[in-house]
Image: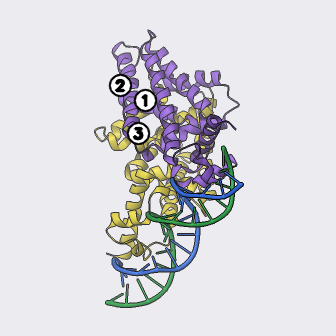
Chain colours: A purple, B yellow, C blue, D green
Amino acid sequence: MKHQDRKKEIIQYAAKLFTEKGYSAVTMRDIASSVGIKAASLYNHINSKQEILTYIIISLAEEFTQGMNRILNSNLSTIDKLKRVIDLHIHITSNNQSGMASLNTDWMHLEDKLKYYLELRKNYEQNFKSIIDKGIAKNELKQGNSEVMLFSILSTLRSLYIWIPNKEHILKDQLSEQLSTVLLNGIVK
Amino acid sequence: MKHQDRKKEIIQYAAKLFTEKGYSAVTMRDIASSVGIKAASLYNHINSKQEILTYIIISLAEEFTQGMNRILNSNLSTIDKLKRVIDLHIHITSNNQSGMASLNTDWMHLEDKLKYYLELRKNYEQNFKSIIDKGIAKNELKQGNSEVMLFSILSTLRSLYIWIPNKEHILKDQLSEQLSTVLLNGIVK
DNA sequence: GTCTATAGCGCGATAGAC
DNA sequence: GTCTATCGCGCTATAGAC
């Protein structure tokens, strides 16, 4: 197998195992066994276990950052910006199911790139909140505590990875529409 | 120190460390060091690391189950039942901040009690969904996909432990009211 | 009830043959 | 590029002195 393909394969299998047991409980022997080689052979393709985790988390975090920047630079209404953010999460989560658990629950095991990750995460939340705050100011959203609104929507979107694998009977477009309705308009008649 | 108090103290410190690094990354030496004794001395109070995790998770899961049963057996409207569920999560999370991360992210490391935990969790979700389904049938809630509604609300409530420690400036009663509004009525004007 | 010492094991990573 | 063998370390848990 070609070197770069093998590297990607290792990262894919590692991400799946990290999802099931968490970074610390997964051994290099576990990863090697999934790939179908011996642990020592992994080191022809990657430098360390830490490097695998870093790659999984940082590439996802940067994908979210880029998506958010595109939305911020658009001329959409607040509602449409929020719908685009919801779509961003559904899209990235659908295409990277196995990596999303690491992003959400194993980021604290990052070493060299921990500060960088926390910076990306903080900026993402601030940008998300600025969309909500502007929506309130422009009277597109209800008056209310924007921190609570942010927390509620973002918690749901960050949990999509737990839920999407079990709900393949709901199509992605339907999910986007239904989730937007619930998150933006509520459930009470 | 009295035996039972020391045991509770060990569980408290362990829960805090599990929150910060996850069960697998926390060592018995870490826990002992937090308590102020040596690792070997822990075993005068607990039988194993696994026993600590089991205690943290199962006692919280049973507290949620009991709270849900009280709500199910009440004669409240759907809206008031949902508000009670929101209060249940705020209440338990406020009183057990350090244990909630284990409940949410370390349950897969349970051994003997894993099946029991999964049973409690499944029943909780089914009961929560039945409240929503009845609300739709009685026309108190909008027509829509009750799985998406359940997922959205429950994801937010299960993430409270991440968020509450940073938002002590919001009083518990205010949080309950604001969160109910956002989750039940949405944010769009 | 806490300590020191340590058993027994599995970990991440490396060396070197093929 | 994969293998076998192994290093050096840290882990959970136990034994036994005080």
Q: How far separated are the C-alphas under marks 1 and 3? A: 38 Å
Residue A181: mark: none
Q: Residues within 10 Å of mark 3 (few under 14, many from 20)?
A: some
Q: Residues within 10 Å of mark 2 (few under 14, many from 20)?
A: some
Residue under the image location 47 percent in, 28 percent down: A62
Marks 1,3: beta carbons within 8 A: no
Q: Which residue is mark 2?
A: A144
Inspect the image, locate mark 3, and give the three-letter code of the amino acid beneath it. Lys
The chain holding disc 3 is: A
Disc 3, SS = loop
Q: Which residue is mark 1?
A: B181
Marks 1,2: beta carbons within 8 A: yes
Inspect the image, locate mark 1, and give the three-letter code of the amino acid beneath it. Thr
Between disc 1 and disc 3, the foreground one is 3
Q: Is residue A163 above or below residue B59?
A: above
Between disc 3 and disc 2, the foreground one is 3
The chain holding disc 1 is: B
Q: Describe residue B63's horizontal placement relative to residue B163 as left or right.
A: right
Disc 1, SS = helix
**x%, y% of residue A71?**
46, 17
**x%, y% of residue B96?**
40, 53
Can residue B95 be seen here? The reply is yes
Q: Which residue is mark 3?
A: A113
Q: How far separated are the C-alphas under marks 3 and 2? A: 36 Å
Residue under the image location 61 percent in, 55 percent down: A29
Between disc 1 and disc 2, the foreground one is 2
